[in-house]
Amino acid sequence: KNQVEQSPQSLIILEGKNCTLQCNYTVSPFSNLRWYKQDTGRGPVSLTIMTFSENTKSNGRYTATLDADTKQSSLHITASQLSDSASYICVVSPDNSGGYQKVTFGTGTKLQVIP
Amino acid sequence: GAGVSQSPSNKVTEKGKDVELRCDPISGHTALYWYRQSLGQGLEFLIYFQGNSAPDKSGLPSDRFSAERTGGSVSTLTIQRTQQEDSAVYLCASSRGGQGRQPQHFGDGTRLSIL
């Protein structure tokens, strides 16, 4: 069964500090991995996408890494801001060579940045 | 607007009533998804549309739930004889294709409360 596990479940950090969120998956074969940010009361918004051959992808202060061998990804947030407070969701897409396949969502990490 | 639009944004209804939730996807997006997100939980897949057909209905929790999509655009999710456990945020997403290579663009959801 395809699974995506995220850790920690929740995290509180001081404004200006860095943090790293983890995602482990069992989806195989694997096509791509995406990180979403979900603000409270809003829908998720895509931050980064990485395919099998990519190791790192940045989007401003967000940097995602991928190790396809160990099936692990991380999202590193640099110099956190209050607006980074949100849930971060890891989403893995299986290989779609056979057409449509359902993506698998992690349960998310709830990040709170405090002044 | 250019994003996915969902209505109503909030719905409060009595147990046993029927409710209809609407999703307007991004123009040109052939794939449309419905998800359910309970408080503090991850996204639960409900149904996937490619055009007007629904090749994957595997997530619908019971026969009280149904969805349709007309004209390859607007979709409605109907819940009949609502129960308290149906209370959740119902999110709609659309993408250019259904194979996972394109990001899913989410609406802000309909928050459904069953009294």
Image (spheres, coloured by chain):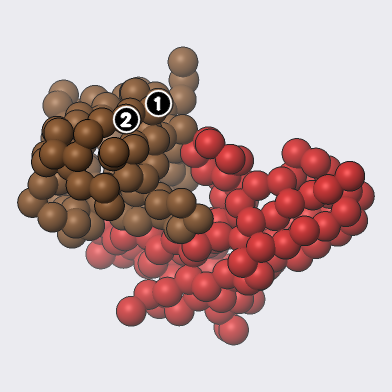
Chain colours: A red, B brown
Query: Considering only vertical position in the picture, is B5 above or below A33?
Result: above
- Count the marks: 2
Q: Quadrant of residue A27?
A: bottom left
Rendering coords of residue B19 (x, y %): 19, 31
Q: Kindly identify which chain the residue marked by label 1 belongs to.
A: B
Query: Considering only vertical position in the picture, is A28 above or below B53?
Result: below
Q: Label 1: which residue?
A: B9
Determine the residue positioned at 44% across, 37% down.
B106
The local crowd at label 1, few if under 14, some if 14 to 19, many if 20 or more residues have their Cα within 10 Å, is: some
Q: Is residue B62 left or right of residue B11?
A: left
Query: Considering only vertical position in the picture, is B77 above or below A91?
Result: above
Question: Which residue ends up furthest to the top in the rendered image?
Answer: B1
Q: Residue B12 got which mark?
A: 2
Answer whether residue B26 is visible to the viewer in this image. no
Check the picture and name the quadrant holding the C terminus of chain A. Answer: top right
Q: Secondary structure at mark 1?
A: loop
Determine the residue positioned at 83% across, 43% down.
A81
Q: Residue A26 got which mark?
A: none
